[in-house]
Every structure is written in C-alpha cells, then in structure tokens.
Amino acid sequence: MYSQEEQRNLYELSKSLLNSPFVGGGRGEAADLFADISPSVGGGRGEVAERAEDLRRVLRYHEWRYYVGNDPVISDFEYDQLYKQLQTIEAAHPQLVTPDSPTQRVGKDLTENAAQVAHLTPMLSLDNSYNAEDLNDFDESVKKLCGLEKDADVEYCVEPKYDGGTIALVYENDRFIRAATRGNGYVGEEITANIRTLRSVPLQAAFSKRGISKVELRGEALIRKDIFEKINKTRQEAGEAVFANPRNAATGGLRMKDPREAAERGLEAFLYQLGYAIDSEGNNLLGNFKSHDESIHLLESLSFKTPLAKGGTKQHLPATKTCRNIAEVIQFCTDWQEYRDEYPYELDGIVVKVNSLELQEKCGSTSHHPRWAIAFKFKARQATTRLRDVEFQVGKTGAVTPVAKLEPVALAGVIVQNVSMHNEEFIRSKDLRIGDQVLVERAGDVIPYIVKSLVELRNGSEQVVHYPKNCPVCHSVLVKPEDEAIWRCENAECEAQVLARMVFHTSKHAMDIEGLGESTIEKFYKLGWLHSIADLYRLDYEAIAKLEGFGEKSAANLKAAVEKAKQNPVHRLFHSLSIHHLGQRTSKLLAAEIGHVLDLRGWDLEKYQTIKDIGPVAAKNVSNFFLNPSNVELLETMERLGVNLRQTDEDKKADVNTDGPLYGKSILFTGTLSQMTREEAEKKAAAAGASLMSGVSKHLSILVVGEKAGSKLKKAQALETVEIWTEAEFLDRIIENA
C-alpha cells in the first residue's frame, strides 16, 4: 500500500521521466531512447542505472493503480512509453536487469487473499504499435522469422482490441468448469461464480465434436457503452462514486464477492482465442487448425460471442477481417481509429495476428509477448495534467461558463489546454481545485472532458474554485433562474454578449457571412466600427481595404458575402438573433407562420404555442424578444439596410431538409461517378441537407471519390479533417439515414 505522499512523489517522477531529455526529442520516439549512451557508462551504475531503478519504481506503482486499484492516474500510452524506456535500457545494459523488473513478468493484477489458479498455458501480453511504420516493421520481422521473401504477402487476422478485463475460461468434457483473470500471465484470480452469471458464456459447448476433451479460451469481459452510462447514472442518483470508464467498471465487476452484484454490472464476454486444446489422451489438438480465423469460427459455431459477432460501424466496417497483406491491415486500422466511437463497446486498438498457425509456430514468442501478434493502439483518449486556473466566459445569451485552463497535454492527436467545466455544480460534484492533477479525456475524440481530480496527489497548495457573484466582463450581478443550472448576466449590453452575438450571427449555420469570423469581428469592434448586429451591414469597405492583412480584393469579397447574406430566408435570420432555445428547426417552424418578421410584434404567448413543436420556453423567449422595443428597433434598422425580413411564398415552399442525414455537412464530388451523373449526385446531397462546395478547403466535411480522382483527393487526404467516401458509401449513407 502506498501513502499519499509516496503516490504524489511517484506521480511527479513519472511525469519527469516522460519529459526527460533522454527521450529522443519527444514522446513516442522510444526507438531512439539512449541511442547515444555508451554501454560502458558507469559499469552499470551511475546515471543510467539510477534511471532504470526510477523506471522500475514508477512502473510498479502504476501497475498497482491499474490492476489492483482499477484507478489509473496516467494513460495507457504514457505507461507504454515508460515501459519502453526501461525495456530499451535493459536491452542495452543486461547487467542492469533485476529479477523483479516489470519487464521480467507479464503483468500483475492479483488481489490479496483471492483464490488463485494456474493457467493451462501462459497468457502473454502484446507488443504495441502506434502507426503504419510500426506495422510495416512488424511485417518485416514476421517475414524474417518465417524465412519469407521481403515482397511476400503474409495473411493477417485483425480484430478489435477490447478495453475490458481479460479472462481465461476452461471447459472439460464440454462443460464450463473454471474462469480466471489474467493475473500475472501464469496465475490468475478464480472468478468462476461471477462468469457463470454472464449469459454470453455458454455453460456447455460441444468441443467433443472436434475431439477436444479439455480447452482453455482467452477473451475479454466488457460492458456495452450504453449500459455503462445507465450504471453511472444510477450510481450518481444513489450518491455513489461514478466509474471513470467502462474498463474499470468491468474489471471491478469480475472481482465482486457476490455473483449477484457482478450480474448487475451487465458484463458480456467476447472470446477470441484457443489457448490450449487436448484430447482425452492428452494430445495437443491446436495443430489440427490451419489458421487463427478457423479456430474463431469454431467458437462462433459453439455459441460463443466472438469478434465475428454481427456489428461494426455505420461506415460498414466489419469488426474483424482477414487481410491479404500488411497494406490491408494498415488501412483497416486507420479506418477503425476514425470510426471506433460508432462501435457499441470501448476499444483501445486493433489486434493484428498472423493468421497461419504454422507461421505463428515459426515466429515463436518472447517471455513477454508473441512475435506473431501486435496491438495497433489508438491515439490516447485519456491523460493526466494540472488544472492551472479557471476562467469564466460570457456567452451570447449571458450564460457564464467556467473554462478550465490546463497545462497543455497531448490527447487523441491534439493538444488540449482549455476544457469547459459546464457549471457550478460540475465543479462542486467533482471537487475540482486549482492546482489539482486531473484526468482528462476526449469524448468521441472530439470534446475534451475532465473525468475527475486525483485527490490523493494533492499537496495542500490547491485552491477552491470560487464562482463569481458578478459578471466578469460588465460586473452586473449574476442571476440563476430556478429551472436552470447556469448563472447568467442579464445585461444585454454586456460587451462579451454583444461580441458573441455578432460572431454567432455571421456563423455558418446562421447568416453565413464568409470573411466575418471571430478575430475579424473583434478587430472591427476594437476599431469602433461595430456596436450591434446592424453595423455588420453598413461597414466601410474602403476603410477595410486599407487595413493590414485585407486589401481591396478581401474587402470586395467581404462586401459580396454581406450583400448575399441580406437575401437569406427569414428562418436563418431568426436563428441568428441568439434568442435562447430558438434553434434551426424551431426558427423554420416560426418563419412558416408569418409574412414578415415584425408581424410578431402583435403576437401573444398563446399564439406562439399554437404552432406544433414550439414549446412554452421557446415561445416565452421569442415573445419577450419582440416585446423589447430595442430589439424591434434593431430589426427595423436592419431592414432599412437591406436585410430581408419578408417571408416569400418561395421560402415557405422551399424544402430545406434540416433533418436530413447530411445537414450541417459540406460536400464535394471528384472523379468519375459510375451510378449517377455529378449533377444527380449533387441534387441527392442537397436533398439530404448538405451544402455543396466548389473546392477542397478546411471547411469541407466530405469528399466523395469516383474513378480517376486527382489532386482534390490528395488535398483532402493532406487536411486529415475531411471524410473520404466512395460513391457506394455516399449512397448507403443517404439511404440508411433517410
């Protein structure tokens, strides 16, 4: 057991080792570690020996946190980097290897006083890869071990790397007799009673039909993501601590002392490998199988849940695939990394296995991992960092949102340093303090989120976050409506709100004025050119042309964009006014009921509520907006400046599909389409709600690629933010979601 001070010191040492100059220029370059250090340094002592001992200490600590406590304080990626540092040192300096080094065993998750059982064969770990180069190196290594030519193709079976609790199941004479955790790879905790509660695990399986008398299967116990969310909601309502992720909930469920409690966790078991199989005479029968996927198909036929189970992504990616060569493997891994959040279970990577069991035998294994398999790890989605400060930002409707200012941390391919903390209750419920070490994740690899503070690492210098009583910009007293969790500034003239409303007004889903982004609006505001939304329509373009960074062409383009926006349909104008709860769909419903925007001056609250799907809150907010004389004056001014306030018959008939599967997406077609003309494709995309683009830019969402695609495809691939679809995928998407 580690004291709080020991944990704090070991955590700080971990961060120091990760950021040490010894790491060849940055994390992820483990192959270059200690490349310039002579093997004779200190005769096995000195700086290198000291570093090796430090690495052993922190790795033992993180194993305890992960496997015993189920409460890690660093990400898997960070652990891997520490492990590789020690591995590299020991490879260069064998005299520094100690019997108790983490590299000399597979892992450890044994709990004191738990019943322990030996596995029939060792359950080794997997070596890790993070990019195409690593996978190509693995392929070269396999060919070398198998005596194959460099240009030969090796067939691989690729399947999900489930992020749960590893298990081993034993069947004898067709009956389930035992289950155990992975433990240290040789001995695990017995969890038979808990696994028996899993409906995904058959209590009988006809292995005898293949002559198998005794078999040991490897698999993973998981909790489906939607069930995990329900479990956390229930725990929160009961005042219990929520789980950090489905993996912790699953591994904890495996160890429950009461099987009934384990059953309530909603665990499922995926089985993905035959580890041991003998007949009644004790003869090894694994040799009867030619390939890995053949053995998985056997398990599927015996009613086990396997990676072959129906399911994949909305992009029609299968959960598992037999690939002809490493190039297909790389493409499969790349696709899954992008779409993994569409899968109902948490994954942290893809497992790549040589499919031929004969070639697996030739590759062999180290004491740590098989040489015929490797894990392609997805980009880290959780990491730890320090909460440096909290800023309070005022939005377009006056909502005051706390934003965490973090020490920059790499997470899922981006640097995260600002994270919304939502509201006061969020801060209180998680007991977040300035100076805390916090666990951060990116939900869906998009939205950064603070999972929890690491209370045990506090040193006493942390500061409680005090929510302001006054607006941080205009200093008006904040109010908190009874039905909301948000504190608001009710001063409509607050500078922050004025700016935020103008930025939103010009945004893509509102009036869509290209060239009037946030930085430009802030610049014009500071110059005194903007005071309200109306000023956006009376800009001095001659003055703009003289500004540094603009010029006559930019000013002319901006003028054209503003003039175009003046002709927008009324529903876009409604949405652009930042009326609380008046979204795109509600704006369209409201616009369909009027001939002119200012008709709403005479409406009472009841009339708004006669419109189907407009609720009482939105109705009240719109009514209050038009009861305010300054708002009416603003709209009258905008109309005098040429902004359209009239709902035409054409607008009423227009079928802008805001509910379409591609609404909010921009799309471009390139190459020769085989099933339709370019014009037909664009009509289908528009009918599905997409906006059409003329070229590749950072604003493009989707590029649909036909035959003989050229430079547009290369540009889109270079941007990395553009989804690239085939013609078939485009048609499937609009039909599937129609």
Image (tube, helix red, strand yellow):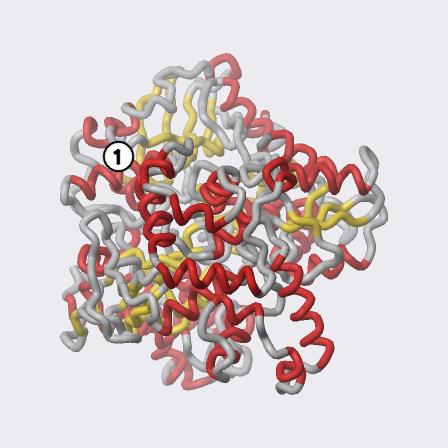
Q: Residue at x 34, y 58 (%)?
A: 628
Q: Residue at x 58, y 37 (%)?
A: 660
Of residue 534 and residue 682, the one placed in the foreground of this image is 534
| Label 1: element kind | loop
Q: In the rendered image of this protein, does residue 519 appear above or below residue 198?
A: below
Say which residue label 1 marks: 190
Q: Residue at x 37, y 45 (%)?
A: 185
Q: Name the amino acid type tagged 1.
A: Glu
**Res. 86 in view:** no
Question: How many tags in the picture?
Answer: 1
**Res. 630 in view:** yes
Q: Residue at x 15, y 43 (%)?
A: 113
User: Where residue 161 sits: x, y (%)?
Assistant: 48, 43
User: Where residue 697 sits: x, y (%)?
Assistant: 68, 62
User: Where residue 602 sits: x, y (%)?
Assistant: 39, 45
Q: Quadrant of residue 121?
A: top left
Of residue 137 and residue 94, the one placed in the foreground of this image is 137
Q: Quadrant of the N terminus?
A: bottom left
Left or right of residue 171, residue 1 in this image: left
User: Where residue 138 sits: x, y (%)?
Assistant: 62, 54
Q: Quadrant of residue 98?
A: bottom left
